[in-house]
Amino acid sequence: MGQTLDYLKETPSQTAGPYVHIGLAPGAAGFDIYDHELGWDIVGPNAKGERIRIEGRVIDGTGAPIKDVMLEAWQANAAGIYAHPEGGGDVEDGFRGWGRVITDFASGEWAFDTVKPGPVTGRCGTVMAPHINLWIVARGINIGLNTRMYFDDEAEANAKDPVINLIEWENRRQTLIATRGTRDGQVVYRFDIRIQGDNETVFFDI
Amino acid sequence: MTKPAEYYQRDRNRHPPAFTPTYKTSVARSPRYSLISLEQSASEITGPVFGHNDIAALDHDLIRNYAKDGDPVGERIIVHGRVLDENARPVPNTLVEIWQANAGGRYRHKKDTYLAPIDPNFGGCGRTLTDENGYYFFRTVKPGAYPWRNMVNNWRPAHIHFSVFGASFCQRLITQLYFEGDPLIPLCPIVQTIPDPDAIDQLTARLDMNATIPLDTIAYKFDIVLRGRRSTLFENRLEGN
């Protein structure tokens, strides 16, 4: 035996449970308590870039939408900068790049409005294609699931993306790519997340 | 931009696995394929930053933040502790959010139909920022145990849900606090998703008489540990380059 390594151990995760909304989106739980809830406005009024909506469902292993899920989004601005001291520079005033998204209790559909992020500098000078990092919690999910959403109109950048290319199974890569469309003049990307089963979404241990 | 210093690899043996059949809801909500391990980039080592403008003065006081005509019913408690990383360094200025049932075990949520009554003076959520030493505290009432549908006779031990951010998106954590001595802890299928008894102990807050306010409020101490970070900046070469 040598010296003792005096590191602490990470606190273990537990499921967010069915009532995650009480703590993190109390308005959705049915009551008004905070001056303002966090995470509804991801980019603020001054963000440059293309305004987009992203919508989808989170689908369980039986094929049913999960109706009590909460997602958190974390993204760079249109210039590829994260709003963080190590994010690569300054961002627009009011841009946080972080949002909370909950599903409709009846349909399981979720949606959020944001700007399309730019490419981000990756490891060793690589360039990562535009993407939004997502973290998914719900009843029955014991530890939050991390994934990334990429954009189908960025095929060239996606083909060079070091994270997409890390996925050995090329047939699974498309699970990370949202489909662009328009509705009432608004750009809408569709991104369904499949927790389990056919076309199971790629999740990352980050 | 400086080269990213990575966070330590998460010890997945300390966390519950995704697939835990005795907690039935996890069966259809757990990926079947392995997670793909990612060497961290800016997307993982950055994360949202919060400040005092984001929260209000009473947000951490669940006895007062929803009170209408008096205090909520229940055992008055302080829950306090520090947010640290695996290097035992404090995590300052980080957002800590909690939610819980009232003293009768009922949540203020339109989906909760348990027969215990709603408390008109209790909302059940709070939030705060850690100070420069990573310290936080909440004042609340001790939540009650309640039954839930899993097997027909499962009860959740009294617990408080915690959400913590840290400085990076890869430190993001949601967990639950349990109370020392609760006989429901070893019976709960959600607690028991955690395979390591030492890790369950880490979720069990201890009675803290030093922090108790005499004749007023009893205290429990609950420290939270987030992932630690390398202090040496070596970037390994890209495979294949």
Image (cartoon, coloured by chain):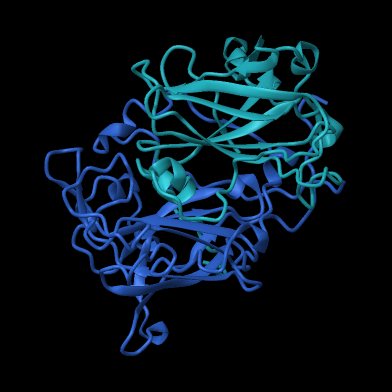
Chain colours: A cyan, B blue
| Res. B64 in view | yes
Horizontal side of A73 relative to A131 (left or right) equals left
Q: Is residue A99 above or below residue B83?
A: above
Q: How many marks?
A: 0
Residue occupying the point 65% across, 41% down: A98
Q: In this view, does A163 lie above or below B67?
A: above
B172 and B89: which one is in front?
A: B172
Horizontal side of A47 relative to A142 (left or right) equals right
Residue A175 placement (x, y as % from top left)? 57, 16
Q: In this view, does B154 lie above or below B63?
A: above
Horizontal side of B40 relative to B241 (left or right) equals left
Residue B197 placement (x, y as % from top left)? 32, 56
Answer with the quarter of the image where residue A165 lies.
top right
Quarter the C terminus of chain A occupies: top right
Residue occupying the point 49% across, 66% down: B60
> Which residue extends farthest front?
B69
Residue A146 placement (x, y as % from top left)? 56, 34
> Which residue extends farthest bottom?
B214
Q: In this view, does B202 lie above or below A31?
A: below
Residue A107 placement (x, y as % from top left)? 40, 22
| Res. A15 in view | no
Residue occupying the point 65% across, 29% down: A113
